[in-house]
Amino acid sequence: MTIIKAMAIACAMYSKIPMPKVDWNEKNMRYALCFFPLVGFLEGAVFFAVFSFLGYLNAPELMKAAVLFAVPILITGGIHMDGFLDTMDALSSYQTKERKLEILKDSHTGAFAIIGCAVYTVLYLGGLSGLVDGRSCLLVCTGFVISRSLSGLSLVLFKGARKNGLAYTFSSSAHKKITRTVLAAVLIVFACLAVSLDGAAGTVMVTGAAAVFAYYRYMSYKEFGGITGDLAGFFLQVCELVMLYGVVIAEGLNSL
């Protein structure tokens, strides 16, 4: 029952998928992060189904890209995009670490968050318009699991910037050894799956995810003194954008 409750907590926290009510106590949250990639798997399943359906309808490329862009937002409720926007505001403030952490907690939306959202949307739509077949879509779907495996690992491997907030709650409640093992295993399996689907595109995609992960740690420590839930959301959004472009560009080069 503890495992089922942990899964329910993970899905309730990181998605809008209806879940039964569960007490968010330390016992039930011990393995919650292990199920973070499950949200990515479910998101990928819906994403692929929508891609296939729109292909069957022979929908225009822009329409297809717009609908696919909405799928992750609708499933997650925009929780990771919210972290991306808060981080854009904080990074653009050029304030002290303490002030940047305050900006992350501020519920107001600044100009740089809006600019960042607009740029991200245009870039992501452009990348989605380059998905030409089911294999490239499947590669992107594996990325939803890879990004969440890395994000979850950061919560149990990296230093936290503060001793409160949801990221700290999940991190401090987690059984770190088991969580690290499960997330690392899922990461390896889906990274290998990506490479098996397309050697060149999968390798570029996984390498891009690793590069963003390294940047995420460096930036978080330098600018904020550690990671937070918002920074984890920022990482996930940037990671998925980079992986998408890795797939599209690599497959484009292969077709030359």
Image: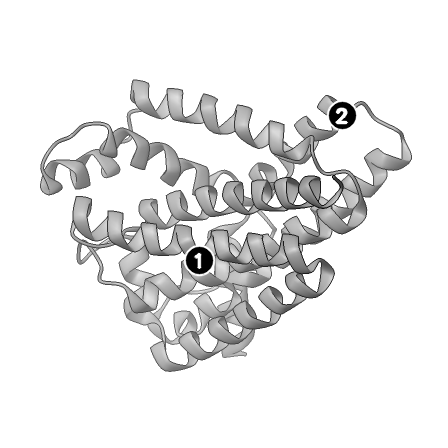
Label 1 sits on residue? 210
Closer to the camera, 165 or 251?
251
SS class of the residue under badge 1? helix
Label 2 sits on residue? 61
Q: Amino acid at mark 1?
A: Ala
Lateral position of residue 87 relative to residue 151, left or right: left
Q: Residue at x 64, y 49 (%)?
A: 140
In which quarter of the view is residue 33 placed? bottom left
Depth check, mark 2 against mark 1: the one in front is 1
Q: Position of residue 35 (x, y in %)?
A: 52, 66
Closer to the camera, 217 or 81?
217
Residues at circles 2 and 1 in contact by the CB criterion of under 8 Å = no
Q: Position of residue 193 (x, y in %)?
A: 67, 66
Lateral position of residue 7 relative to residue 79, left or right: right
Q: Earlier in the sequence, mark 2 or mark 1?
A: 2
Q: Which image quadrant: the N terminus?
A: bottom right
- The image shows residue 186, relative to residue 108, as above or below, that is below
Q: Residue at x 49, y 51 (%)?
A: 208
Q: Residue at x 27, y 60 (%)?
A: 168
Closer to the camera, 34 or 131?
131
